[in-house]
């Protein structure tokens, strides 16, 4: 199957729902090892994304992602705004041209999105950042042949959970050194919600 | 937690209106943004100085706008870096043809957002340089150090240098010199409460203090039993001095900065001991600043900052500033 404009819109709407539902939880996670505003910032940003997308007649998946990227960059702030914004911007650039996106093109877009996060955040795997969700998820999805809701759900869940045992070396959690261990990384948890939302909207199509 | 607010989501924008209302002759706001600038910006042929970051650090950053200091300050949400489009607006508003220096505190969000703004400005042909302040010695890894109260000295000295008509490169070089010679460390006695969440940033027992605290209520590096003013001053100064490597004849600028809820009386107690320690070492306190310069909402606690001076830095520190929060 191919990923359509409708699914792209649905993905962001569902992402927003999950982030709004878990806004307080995300902030609590951030309170433990950061500055406690992750839920607030993500909720504000994704709410704006949905508002921006609403009522527009999009012809391409890439345009949906581009508007999402620009909105996230200008409304979220903090570190999450540039990181999620860059991810969607790179995805938009990779998906340019086609009305719907094939699985291979979708994976290429996700891969570029993940690479964008690494580059913007100067981060790599194992530093207790959202890279620790994006990289393993992209790697596992690359091995599949087609959209697989279960694989997206499971790979993102286990990657998110694995951030608990990592000692942070990037972001504000790094100030805590060993004390950052035992806490989930908030940016990985919000990335997990975004992948869960993707899984949900793919499952809805099967 | 009791707060004097209206709507938690309007705190930043309402605060900026208040700041402009307090200094209408000096400061103006760019409409529909969270950017405030000098009333007469852009100043032709002078390097523009832009700083900013999350709100909640007042008087930083808008209070440092003035002749001899900042040309613009960009306010993010509470403890959240402003977004690139806002920083870009500030850059455009203060570019008088000689380029713009961005003073960034070393937090991943701030660095990313300001860098993106710099890229946008460069694409439009504005000359932009950036410096990243990292003065908090609580973090061992030098590249990972946070920017805290030492940032005020960067504003002051870069701003003074820009007034001399220096080039963007020269202003950047002197800002880098300050960054290389400034060190800070802080302690918190109570957490702060963000208006939007209404929750304390961390839990701290009645008889505890958090040493190595940042300015966002992020936990520090070590939790200890509450100590006396002399002991707190000694510990903070010790870490700062270990890192700064001063010798007998050196001169420093001292800043004892309140984090929001500690009375000035207590800050002076800390300063008293800091001065004593410097005298013992034979280091001369050339100029001392005691007060609230870079706060963390209503956090109780303080930080100690030392800036090692040379002739150039002394002269620039002494030159006039009419910024509301730093007059000299």
Image (cartoon, rainbow, N blue to C red):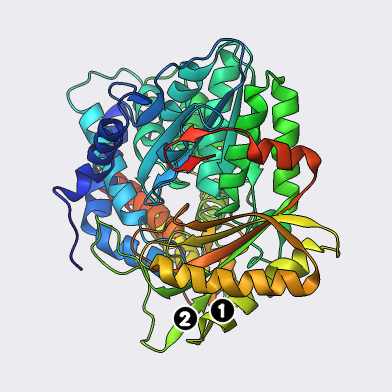
Q: On what subunit does the disc labeled 1 rest?
A: B
Residue at 40 percent across and 41 percent down: it is A77
Quadrant where the image shows the N terminus of chain A: top left
Camera-nearest residue between B104 and B273: B273
Labels in figure, total = 2
Secondary structure under badge 2? strand
Does A174 sit left or right of B22 as displayed?
right
Residue B117 rendering spot, x and y as whole percentages: 52, 27
Give the distance between the C-alpha atoms of the residues marked 1 and 2, in whole angstroms.
10 Å
**Contact (Cβ within 8 Å) of mark 1 with mark 2:** yes
Q: Nearer the viewer, mark 1 or mark 2?
A: 1
Classify mark 1: residues with Cα within 10 Å, few (<14), some (14-19) or many (20+).
many
Residue B72 rendering spot, x and y as whole percentages: 46, 28
Residue B292 rendering spot, x and y as whole percentages: 44, 56
Residue placed under numbered mark 1 in the picture:
B232
Q: On what subunit does the disc labeled 2 rest?
A: B
Residue placed under numbered mark 2 in the picture:
B209
Classify mark 2: residues with Cα within 10 Å, few (<14), some (14-19) or many (20+).
many
Secondary structure under badge 1? helix
Marks 1 & 2 on one chain: yes
Instruction: Look at the picture and state if A168 lies above or below B319.
Output: below
Residue B2 rendering spot, x and y as whole percentages: 18, 65
Residue at 67 percent across and 29 percent down: it is B161
Q: Quadrant of residue B35?
A: top left
Q: Quadrant of residue A174?
A: bottom right
Does B234 sit left or right of B59 as displayed?
right
């Amino acid at each position: 199957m191919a990923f359509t404009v409708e699914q792209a819109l649905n993905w962001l709407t569902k992402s927003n729902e999950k982030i709004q539902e878990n806004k307080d939880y995300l902030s609590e996670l951030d309170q433990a090892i950061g500055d406690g505003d992750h839920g607030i910032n993500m909720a504000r940003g994704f709410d704006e994304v949905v508002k921006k997308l609403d009522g527009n007649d999009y012809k391409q998946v890439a345009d949906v992602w581009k508007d999402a990227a620009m909105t996230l960059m200008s409304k979220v702030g903090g570190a999450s705004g540039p990181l999620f914004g860059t991810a969607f911007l790179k995805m938009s650039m990779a998906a340019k041209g086609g009305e719907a996106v094939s699985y291979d093109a979708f994976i290429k877009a996700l891969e570029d999105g993940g690479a964008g996060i690494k580059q913007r955040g100067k981060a790599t795997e194992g530093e207790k950042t959202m890279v620790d969700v994006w990289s393993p998820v992209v790697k596992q999805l690359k091995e599949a042949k087609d959209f697989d809701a279960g694989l997206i759900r499971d790979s993102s869940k286990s990657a998110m959970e694995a951030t608990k045992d990592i000692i942070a070396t990037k972001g504000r959690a790094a100030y805590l050194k060993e004390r950052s261990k035992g806490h989930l990384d908030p940016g990985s948890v919000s990335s997990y919600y975004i992948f869960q939302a993707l899984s949900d909207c793919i499952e809805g199509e099967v | 937690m009791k707060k004097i607010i209206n709507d938690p989501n309007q705190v930043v924008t309402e605060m900026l209106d208040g700041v402009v209302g307090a200094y209408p002759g000096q400061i103006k706001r760019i409409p529909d943004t969270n950017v405030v600038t000098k009333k007469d910006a852009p100043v032709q042929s002078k390097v523009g100085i832009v700083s900013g970051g999350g709100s909640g650090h007042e008087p930083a950053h808008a209070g440092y706008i003035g002749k001899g200091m900042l040309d613009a300050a960009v306010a993010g949400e509470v403890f959240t870096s402003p977004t690139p489009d806002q920083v870009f607006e500030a850059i455009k508003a203060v570019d008088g043809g000689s380029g713009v220096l961005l003073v960034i505190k070393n937090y991943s969000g701030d660095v990313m957002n300001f860098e993106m703004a710099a890229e946008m400005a460069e694409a439009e042909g504005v000359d932009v340089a950036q410096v990243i302040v990292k003065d908090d010695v609580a973090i061992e890894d030098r590249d990972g150090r946070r920017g805290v109260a030492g940032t005020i000295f960067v504003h002051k000295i870069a701003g003074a240098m820009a007034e001399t008509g220096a080039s963007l490169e020269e202003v950047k070089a002197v800002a880098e010199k300050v960054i290389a010679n400034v060190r800070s460390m802080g302690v918190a006695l109570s957490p702060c409460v963000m208006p939007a969440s209404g929750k304390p940033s961390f839990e701290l027992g009645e008889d505890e203090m958090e040493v190595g605290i940042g300015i966002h209520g992020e936990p520090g590096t070590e939790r200890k039993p509450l100590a006396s003013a002399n002991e707190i001053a000694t510990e903070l100064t010790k870490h700062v001095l270990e890192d700064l490597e001063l010798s007998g004849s050196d001169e420093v600028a001292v800043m004892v900065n309140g984090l929001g809820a500690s009375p000035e009386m207590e800050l002076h107690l800390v300063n008293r001991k800091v001065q004593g320690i410097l005298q013992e070492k034979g280091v001369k306190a050339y100029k001392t600043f005691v007060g609230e310069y870079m706060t963390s909402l209503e956090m109780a606690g303080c930080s100690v900052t030392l800036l090692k001076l040379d002739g150039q830095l002394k002269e620039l520190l002494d030159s006039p500033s009419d910024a509301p929060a730093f007059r000299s």
